[in-house]
Image: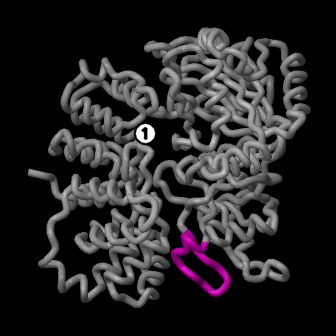
Amino acid sequence: MSTPFRTLVELCEKLEATKKRLVMINLAAGFLKTLDPQEIEPAISIILGRPFPKWSQLTLDVSWSTVSAIMKRITKIDWSAFEEAFSKTGDVGSATKVVFEGSSVKRQTTLLQRTLTILEVRRSFEDIGKAVGYGSREKKERLIEALLSSASPVEAKYLVRVFIRGMRTGFYEGLMEQAVSEAFQIPLQQIQMASMIVGDIGEVAAIAATKGKEGLSKTGFKIFRPLNLMLAQMANNIAEALKEHGGKTAFEYKYDGVRVQIHKLGDEVKIFSRRLTDATESLPEIVDTVRENVAAKEAILEGEVIAVDRSGVPIPFQHLMRRFRRVRAVEDAAERVPLRLYLFDILYLDGKSLVSSSYCQRRQALAGNAGKIPLAEQIATDDVDKAEEFLHKAIDAGQEGLMAKKLDSQYMPGFRGKRWLKIKPVLEPLDLVIVAAEYGYGRRHGWLSDYYLAARDADTGEFLVVGKTFKGLTDAEIIEMTRRLKETTIKEERYREVVIPKIVVEVTYNEIQKSPKYESGMALRFARISRIREDKTAEQADTIQRVREIYEKQFLKKGRYKTD
């Protein structure tokens, strides 16, 4: 018998009600053991707030304005009731549950509703994601309305959370890996390794349930299925990086571009962004470059794409992002904004995984298979002065700074650690999420131009405000930002609109201070938006834990006020 969707949301309610990680793991493990194998991946994806597995290129592509309009039709409520509920809970899902419970129409039709199942919800998501082209908007609306009309108030709460990508149960992927390990009695290390290779814990759990340890031991990369990227921590300076890596290390240019993962099978090439979305159609010249130069039949490569002017000098990041968003008139755009690819890693080559090989071995394999594609500029040294000189050379070339990579480091998909370190010559910028915006004054009257910036709490998934800014965007960007924010508005106030946390911006600042003004307890001083991070999702934004870490690091070079 198919598992009712109700049992999944009941689990989510229990997860949300506790902060005890061991209790959460036990609850999730017990639930997973009750599922049919075909239900495991869809259930895990939904619990983690995703409509599809991480590798899927399907997207719901549904705006909040569409979802809210459908909710109004279904519940027939005065929308002020939703805004009041949102003001009390601060959560779109919880406010949805309140208005569905309060709708007399909803109560009258409850007995006529069919029971949703986990697989039916997944199929509905797939149908919504596959609705493209002429008439797709109307089809999506019909599908969403049918799904929400069949949902109980608590089911609607979690469906809406999936639509807006904000689950807020505090149950993140690392805890799910532990739950899968417990449910199917497989060592956590094996689950984690398989999850890194496969790129999706839901699929790993399904393999664990049906094929056990032996099945997991045979998992490998699949060409054209993107895997999570290895990430880096920040180092304050060259000396710190050398100390952390125990002496000699490899320094590479940190290009002011967009990181890409390139998959090649024969003559077919696909390019994925750091969000793991397919960007192939937008980058035809990069596809041609890989096809012409990489002789290997099968390969997974990593590199950085930068935009350059006609003389080859790097140009600002926003011009590059226009190329990544473009799917029409690409040839014309390629003429105006030329791109250049630099390769810096290779993860898979002709049937063999290289992630367990050392950085030096991978770099050697990359050099032997890149053809005429340039590799990231690099030196390996334990000399601070030489590395400092190399850093200045990178900055003079228009790049962001350096990466320091431990010579014997393996590639760890999805892992952020000190094996790779970022070094920038300025105070580290933060990638933050806009959660609200106020209308401006004077020539900015009528435009949302003063933005509330929030960091993500890694434990709860909540977004906590750490400052405001009206600086950094051009008039044209403010107009476009206003349009995008209005599509995600949850609550309208006199001068301010509260929005779904979705748009990520890179923010520079002078320092971080303690502040009672914000719930986070932190505030950025002289914050300024330096660019819009179209290549990042809200889940990839910096965390409040990172903000607090940077705050503490400030006292390595300055005194601490006595009340701190």
Residue 457 pos. (x, y %): 53, 53
Q: Residue 111, relative to residue 26: is it above or below?
A: below
Find residue 237 and report its image quarter: top right
Numbered range of the magenta stretch: 486-499
Find residue 192 and report its image quarter: top left
Colour setting? one colour
Find residue 346 and report its image quarter: top right
Residue 5 pos. (x, y %): 22, 58
Q: Which residue is mark 1?
A: 55
Residue 386 pos. (x, y %): 88, 16
Tell me if residue 317 can be seen: yes
Of 215 and 95, the residue lying toward us: 215
Q: Residue 439, relative to residue 2: is it above or below?
A: below
Q: Is residue 459 left or right of residue 162?
A: right
Q: Number of numbered discs present?
A: 1
Membership of 257 in magenta stretch: no
Residue drawn at 64 percent across, 87 percent down = 494
Of the residues shown, which amino acid type is indicated by label 1? Trp
